[in-house]
Amino acid sequence: MKISERGQKVPPSPIRKLVPFAEMAKDKGVTVHHLNIGQPDVATPQQFFDAVATFPDKVVAYGHSLGFATLRKAMAAYYQRLGYDVQVDHLTITTGGSEAILFAMMAICDAGDEILCFEPFYTNYNGYAVQACVTLAPVRCMVEDGYHLPPRAQIEAKIGPRTKAILVCSPNNPTGTVLRRDEMQMLVDIARERDLFIISDEAYREFVYGEVPHTSIMQFPEISDRTVLMDSLSKRYSLCGARVGCVIAHNPDLRRTFLHLGQARLCSPSLEQHGSIPLMSLGDDYFKGVQAEYKRRRDTVMKGLAEIPNVQCRTPEGAFYVMARVPVKDAGRFAQWLLTNFRLDQETVMVAPGDGFYATPGLGMDEIRIAYVLEVDRLERAMRCLKQGLEQYKD
């Protein structure tokens, strides 16, 4: 028996594919510093647990396919405080930001259509594109430019007859780049002139560190009929396992499609939706504390990278990731070697190989993504492991 071509094309996660080697190292008593995955260790707000504990129903029943009305109302209020025109009817709750990606692709594209994206990009875009039978048309962003957008001509050169949308992520996973307003305006202009949708992934909105302010696609009302905002509570509230996200659209045809896609999977998790409601009211004090902590972590990682010879990177302006070009030919083999062969005082570090964040074959082979999601002390130890690992590693 042979499985489908689509099934064969679904790529393994570059973030998780080395987990078996990490588990073997742990079984041998080795401490593994996980910089491979964006799982924050900042405590989930207590309000979430308190709300779950007071869930009012005696049966955890199916919820509405659009999501709890109470959560949608609270989410709309959150966006309105940011100055965005988001009403309850514009919101569809999704099972995490991941389902938001799939819903957006399925609603906008037919099989064989293309979505223009900027590489390196969040690896699951590729996985969901395969599931949706959509092709990603990559536009390369360079480390030398801080992974900011290339000139307009380079972007438009990638637009073909089957291109339906531009997919953008800011603050960016995996680079930490925050797009300037003029960059977002350029994409808006292209979308209007070339009759394209814009899908904007804004899961890291609050994770900005002062260099460049976040610009949302919602700040361009002139194209509200052709935009989809994808969002997630996972990183903002350290709530990755709860799987609560949303898609936002003004276009009624898109909203109707999101409803139908939601009906096919019935509903998003009920307890987690209920627990998320009070989080929507957390104010600036909460976010300022989180931002300050991640800025300390970012600065710790950048200091460590600066002490390693022949490493090329730029200081990330947001999110909690940095892409670094390292002096190896195959970062995947190096990342595996760190787990299987390298030890520093019975410790090692786990990073994500860079090639999985590209669609263009051969790119990212000498890059790694680091997620600075550990406390400063552990990050310092992890960076020492990375430095000594690079000194000892032989291609």
Image (cartoon, grey):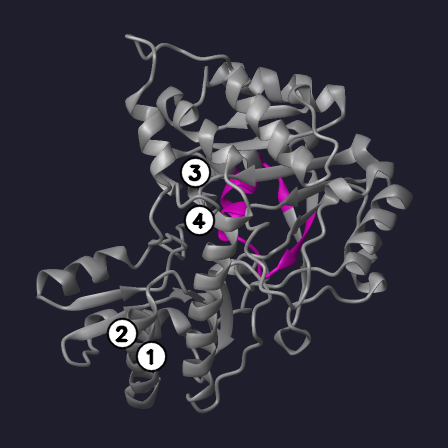
Find the distance from the CA under tag 4 to the CA under tag 2: 23 Å
Foreground mark, 1 or 2, reads: 1
- Mark 3 or 1 closer to N-term? 3
The magenta region covers 116-135
Q: Which mark is residue 338?
A: 2
State yes or no: residue 123 in magenta: yes
Q: Which mark is residue 11?
A: 4
State yes or no: residue 155 in magenta: no
Type of amino acid under label 1: Leu
- Mark 4 or 2 closer to N-term? 4
Q: Which residue is mark 1?
A: 386
Find the distance from the CA under tag 2 to the CA under tag 3: 30 Å
* Residue at 42 percent of width and 88 percent of height: 308
Residue in front for this viewpoint, 54 or 255: 54
Find the distance from the CA under tag 3 to the CA under tag 1: 35 Å
- Return the x and y of residue 14 as percentages of the image width and height: 40, 57
Foreground mark, 3 or 1, reads: 1
Find the distance from the CA under tag 3 to the CA under tag 4: 9 Å
Q: Secondary structure at mark 3?
A: helix
Q: Is residue 130 left or right of residue 270?
A: right
Mark 1–mark 2 contact, CB under 8 Å? yes
Residue 378 in sight: yes
- Mark 2 or 3 closer to N-term? 3
Type of amino acid under label 3: Gly
